[in-house]
């Protein structure tokens, strides 16, 4: 149901960003077959503004294709100060989704996620809230994100018991962060749940972006979630080696990094970010590469050696 490459609006679509650029990326994505757009209540900055941008783009034309799109949003991280602004109570999840629908100007989302497990609210309450949301018509399907294997199993058991249409787990997965291989992919597979891999390019590290320093305007230069400390000499050395493998295979590092994730049939889609249409185009080449330039066993083992620091 999802395209191999989906687009996330965590960065580059906030009120601090250039609206025309955001709009052109979204239209371009849809024209190129990206039918899935992923948001969350707090994406911006400022929190909520990515949903406002997306709603404006829908209103300015893209919304004519609403039935050809899978739109998702989430709640669970801090959204407003004061009571009920965070985590996984029924109160928070329902209030937050109502706000998201208003910001985007849509009547329903296709997928609503609980963004992260809540250590205090009983999981039964969060899952019952997801069920209520679907029954009320505000979401077609539900998903969870950032749940560890045992938590995901419990959530899936409850959702299955409730007969809630749950279809997806959204988890960080890239060459530098492979925690999902340690049990999560087995659990999702057992329950027939898809996995969408977020930050598949490690926020840009697994591209040519930082091969020659930290460019102005790049995510790392902006002092947000991707810190310069993440680019250690050791990591850069690995990125350079991976880039050499990609070049030898006749592809970009970004394309190879995405292809590496999609080598596993249990992963449904890679959820990329992009600050330009050109970046998105580079990332979309993976769709063809999957068929025409598959990773051989030798490629995979060479990549493995680099990732293991050999
Ligand atoms: P990526 O790993 O794809 O990083 C995207 C960034 O990498 C871009 O903004 C750009 O940065 C750079 N980049 C992308 N393509 C290229 C390219 N071809 N060449 C050079 N640089 C490139 O994903 P994100 O970290 O942005 O996450 C993607 C989505 O995943 C989010 O939008 C969100 O929807 C979801 N997500 C979910 C989370 C959750 O908890 N569920 C948490 C985090 C993300 P630059 O600005 O430097 O150009």
Image (spheres, rainbow, N blue to C red):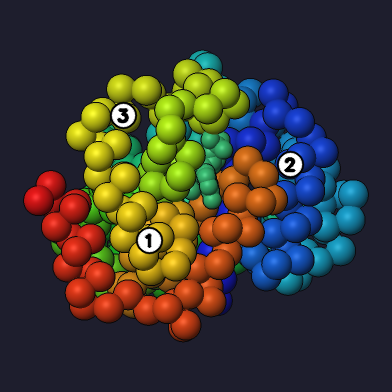
**Dot 2: element:** helix
Disc assigned to residue 12: none
Task: Return the x and y of residue 304 as percentages of the image width and height.
Answer: 17, 60
Cα separation between marks 2 and 1 = 29 Å
Residue 234 placed where, x, y %? Answer: 20, 34
The residue depicted at 67 percent of the width and 31 percent of the height is: 14
> Which residue is labeled 2 in the image?
22
From the Cβ of disc 2, is ligand 1 less than 8 Å away?
no
Please tell me which of labels 3 and 1 falls first in the chain.
3
How much space separates mark 3 and mark 2, taking CA atoms?
27 Å
Left or right: residue 74 versus residue 261 is: right
The quadrant holding residue 212 is top left
Q: Quick one: SS at disc 1?
A: helix
Find residue 247 and report its image quarter. Answer: bottom left
- How many other residues sit within 10 Å of disc 1, few (<14), some (14-19) or many (≥20)? some
Image vertical order of residue 65 relative to residue 43, above or below? below
Q: Secondary structure at mark 3?
A: helix
37 to 298, vertically: above or below: above
Asked if residue 47 can be seen in this view, the reply is no
Q: Which residue is mark 1?
A: 246
Question: Which residue has dot 3 on it?
Answer: 230
Other-residue count near label 3 (Cα within 10 Å), few / some / many at <14 / 14–19 / ≥20? few
Taking depth in this image into account, of 88 and 307 the one nearest to the observer is 307
Percent position of residue 118, x then y = 32, 38
Q: Nearer the viewer, residue 291 or 15?
A: 291
Residue at point 81%, 66% (across, down): 65
Mark 3 CB lies closer than 8 A to ligand 1: no
* Circle nearer the N terminus (2, 1): 2
User: Which-is-in-front pick, marks 3 and 2?
Assistant: 3
CB-based contact (under 8 Å), mark 3 and mark 2: no
Q: Earlier in the sequence, mark 3 or mark 2?
A: 2
The N terminus: image quadrant: bottom right
């Amino acid at each position: 149901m999802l395209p191999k490459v989906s687009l996330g609006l965590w960065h580059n679509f906030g009120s601090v960003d250039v609206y025309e650029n955001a709009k052109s990326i979204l239209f371009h994505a849809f024209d190129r077959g990206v039918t899935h757009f992923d948001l969350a209540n707090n994406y911006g900055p400022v929190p909520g503004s990515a949903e406002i941008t997306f709603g404006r783009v829908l209103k300015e034309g893209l919304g004519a294709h609403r039935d050809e799109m899978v739109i998702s949003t989430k709640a669970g991280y801090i959204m407003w100060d004061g009571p009920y602004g965070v985590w996984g109570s029924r109160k928070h999840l329902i209030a937050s989704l109502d706000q998201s629908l208003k910001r985007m100007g849509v009547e329903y989302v296709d997928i609503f996620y609980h963004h992260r497990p809540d250590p205090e609210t009983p999981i039964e309450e969060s899952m019952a809230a997801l069920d209520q949301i679907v029954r009320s018509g505000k979401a077609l399907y539900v998903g969870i994100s950032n749940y560890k294997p045992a938590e995901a199993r419990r959530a899936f058991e409850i959702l299955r018991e409730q007969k809630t249409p749950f279809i997806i787990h959204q988890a960080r997965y890239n060459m530098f962060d492979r925690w999902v291989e340690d049990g999560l992919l087995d659990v999702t597979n057992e329950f027939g749940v898809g996995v969408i891999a977020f930050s598949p390019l490690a926020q840009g590290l697994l591209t040519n972006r930082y091969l020659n320093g930290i460019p102005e305007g790049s995510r790392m230069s902006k002092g947000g979630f991707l810190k310069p400390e993440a680019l250690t000499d050791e990591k850069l050395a690995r990125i350079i080696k991976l880039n050499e493998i990609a070049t030898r295979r006749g592809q970009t590092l970004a394309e190879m990094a995405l292809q590496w994730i999609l080598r596993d049939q249990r992963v449904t889609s890679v959820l990329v970010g992009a600050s330009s249409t050109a970046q998105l185009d580079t990332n979309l080449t993976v769709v063809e590469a999957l068929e025409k330039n598959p990773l051989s066993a030798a490629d995979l083992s060479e990549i493995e050696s680099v990732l293991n620091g050999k």
